[in-house]
Every structure is written in structure tokens, then in C-alpha cells.
Image: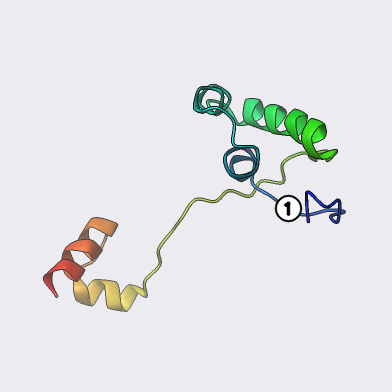
Amino acid sequence: ALMADAIDLYPEYTGTGLLVLLQPDPKVAEAVSKEPQQTYEYVDKAFRKCYGVQWLKPIGFNNAYALMMRRQQAEKLHIRSISDLKAYLDAK
């Protein structure tokens, strides 16, 4: 849809835009990935050039991962960290 000019607006992570859609040389990716603002500016400029799409200001999402467990179950199984969970699963 992006390449067919069929998108008016959609949310995207700058990291995904950089690494998946633009796929720059690894040295370029490493250089612009050191600071979020630098990544944003590179991706915005490249998307304007490649797709005619302007990136809006970041809205504060990030794609960090988290795990959750009910407190009662975690206490029962003595799980306080991801390492504890791994050890518990490995022992099964």
C-alpha cells in the first residue's frame, strides 16, 4: 500500500521504517540509530524522497516488550524476574 500510494496515514515505528522499509547499509543504520531524534530525521527525509510521505512528530509509543503474571501465581512459583521464569520453565 505504501508503494502503491494507497496510504493517507498510518502509525509506524521509526526503527521499523528504518530497518524494514528503508533497509539502509548497516553502517548507515548504525550511525543514525544512536539517538532517537537522529533516527527520526533520517527516516523522515528518506521517506519523503522514496515514497513522498512525511513523518509526523513521534507520539511516544515504543516497541519494548514486557511480560506479566498474576501476583498470586508469581508468589506461589517464586518468580520475580524473567530469569526466574526461564529457570522454572526449563525445570518442567
As rendered, which of 20 and 88 lies closer to the eye?
A: 20
- Identified at 50% across, 22% down, the residue is 27
- Identified at 16% across, 67% down, the residue is 90
Q: Residue furthest front?
A: 4
Residue 42: x percent and y percent?
69, 27
As rendered, which of 12 and 53 lies closer to the eye?
A: 53
Q: Is residue 90 above or below residue 57?
A: below
Q: Residue furthest left?
A: 91
Secondary structure type for disc 1: loop
Q: Is residue 29 above or below residue 17?
A: above
- Identified at 73% across, 53% down, the residue is 11
Residue 24: x percent and y percent?
59, 31
As rendered, which of 6 and 71 lies closer to the eye?
A: 6
Q: Is residue 78 above or below residue 83?
A: below
As rendered, which of 11 and 57 lies closer to the eye?
A: 11
Q: Quadrant of residue 83?
A: bottom left
Q: Quadrant of residue 47?
A: top right
Amino acid under label 1?
A: Pro
Residue at which label 1 appears: 11
Residue 41: x percent and y percent?
71, 27
Residue 1: x percent and y percent?
78, 56
